[in-house]
Image: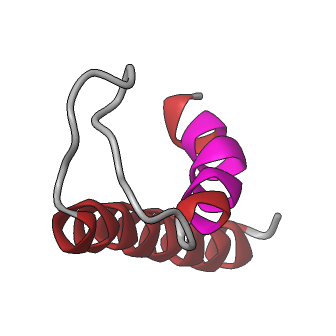
Amino acid sequence: MVIRGQIRWLTPFTLAQVGDARQFRYGGEGEIDATFTFRERSRALLCNARWAAQALQSADQLGF
């Protein structure tokens, strides 16, 4: 499942780069604005967290 795979790498990857003075695009080609980078990654993490919460709620309702 793609979402599950993203959760596994996105959080540690994001946190590991917080202290870096320079931020790079995926693949390392060219710099990117750190504010933009972390805002977008934070949005992705929030989306994944919401999906996870919905999945847990659905599992409870279905008796899992």
Residue 24 against residue 54 in the figure, above or below: above
Residue 55 visible somewhere in the drawing: no
x%, y% of residue 48?
47, 62
Q: Nearer the viewer, residue 8 or 17?
A: 17
Residue 42 visible somewhere in the drawing: yes
Looking at this view, name the residue that lies furthest to the front.
21
Based on the picture, tell me whether residue 9 belongs to the magenta stretch: yes
Q: Residue at x 57, y 72 (%)?
A: 19
Q: Residue at x 66, y 73 (%)?
A: 56
Based on the picture, tell me whether residue 14 belongs to the magenta stretch: yes
x%, y% of residue 13?
62, 51
Of the 4 image quadrants, the one containing the N terminus is top right
Residue 61 against residue 15 in the figure, above or below: below
Q: Is residue 1 left or right of residue 47?
A: right
x%, y% of residue 36?
17, 66
x%, y% of residue 4?
63, 42
Residue 58 against residue 9 in the figure, above or below: below
Residue range in magenta is 5-15
Q: Residue at x 27, y 66 (%)?
A: 34
